[in-house]
Image (cartoon, grey):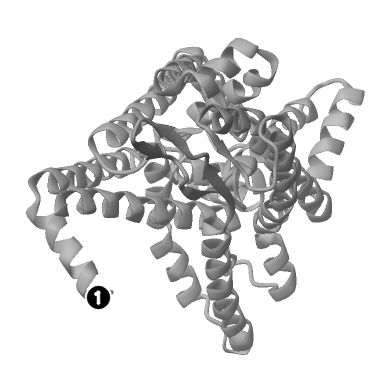
Amino acid sequence: MGETFIRKLKLVVEDEVLRSRVLFVLGALIVFRLLAAIPIPGIDPVALQNYLNNNQFLGLLNIFSGGGFSTLSIMMIGVSPFITGSIVMQLATVLSPALKTMYQEEGDAGRMRFMQYSRYLTLPLAFIQAFGFLILLRGSGVVSSLDMVHTVANVCVIAAGALLLMWIGELITEFGIGNGISLIIFSGIVARIPSALSHVVFGFDVSQIPAYVGFIIAAAAIVGGVVFITEAERPIPVTYARRVRGMKVMGGVSTYLPIRVNQAGVMPIVFALSILLFPQMIGSFLAKSGILIVSSVGSAVVAALANQWIYGALYFFLVFLFTYFYTAITFEPHQIAKNLQKNGAFVPGVRPGATTSEYLANIITRITLVGALFLGVLAILPLILRGLTGITSLTIGGTALLIVVSVVLDLVKKIDAQTSIREY
């Protein structure tokens, strides 16, 4: 295994195309990190840090901004508008048969058009999110009061940063290796590791050694579990009917159809975060209203979402629900059964057509239960560990962990595929 790794690494270094792709990815990520260090004017760093520490939602948003929100940089909303636009388009496939056909049945050309619509939707969402967060932060004392000209300028700069980051992500996908948006989020998470380790080292408490040891063991077990569930799949045997054409016998081959346990990936957590973020923002706005009833309702919403039990229960329920929802969008048993029947393939012991579709639907429903429970527990994992250990500096971010593992596994597979092609 070690010799294979060294050989493939040597091939990556020696092959001009692979080397240029890897260097392009590194260069693009360096540009992103430099831009993420440029703050918008009028920030109170102490107030910002306190606000982020006391807000679960913005802490998670900081993950999807690639760490730009923690410094209120010009990249503060990161790829969040693009992710939100993609979510809206995914939800629209349920309401629009034309969009569903485009996404599921028109192949690569249809998916490219679908993604283009997501990019168009990113533009207004970037301006809306930039203005909304700027007003929210100004009301919390994190950003100083600005006049209309400076507010408009800040909104334009923040929205432009989000669009620029989306463009950088698309360039990485096209000219680099791996998914550009995922790599940007991954780089932001990894960039926060030195700061987190420094907090652990300087805040080390000898009396908490058993908790630290337990944390390390739990971290290793959780990483192993994430890898296992991410790679786990249920193989469904498929046989192609034997056909005789002239003197040739075609078909008769047995293979399998892999169905992943975690079919939805990290998207259900993104969906749940987006849904939970809006009540927090709306409640914060209403709490500052001059009308007593409106301000009372806003304060009640903020207080309810600040409760760890209520927040954890809602978060788990939404992640569980959206896992089934996103799986239903991306995995269509009827279409798969139809394609198998067209190609002369069948599942042994199952009639082609509607019976095969029902068989696949039952399987995906059962294994999605495991994936939904896994994602739900992973989402509320920081709350569980904080409650068990009482250590806030050592908290395994389940969402961040899932993103890191998924991106690394996907990147390794794509590099391995590129090196295998060149070896042959």
Location of the N terminus by quadrant is bottom left
Q: Nearer the viewer, residue 236 or 108?
A: 236
185 relative to 337 in the view: left or right? left
- At which x and y percent is residue 84? 56, 28
- At which x and y percent is residue 201? 46, 76
**Whether residue 151 can be seen here:** no
**Quadrant of residue 392 within the rendered picture:** bottom right
**Whether residue 309 can be seen here:** yes
Q: Nearer the viewer, residue 263 or 115?
A: 263
Q: Residue at x 65, y 12 (%)?
A: 96
What amino acid type should be assigned to the residue bearing mark 1? Gly
Question: Mark 1, residues whose alpha carbon is within 10 Å: few (<14), some, or many (≥20)?
Answer: few
- At which x and y percent is residue 161? 38, 27
Dot 1 lies on which element? helix
- Label 1: which residue? 2
* 383, above or below 96, in the image: below
Q: Residue at x 33, y 35 (%)?
A: 247
Q: Residue at x 43, y 45 (%)?
A: 185
Q: Nearer the viewer, residue 377 or 155?
A: 377
374 relative to 18 in the view: left or right? right
Q: Residue at x 59, y 58 (%)?
A: 398
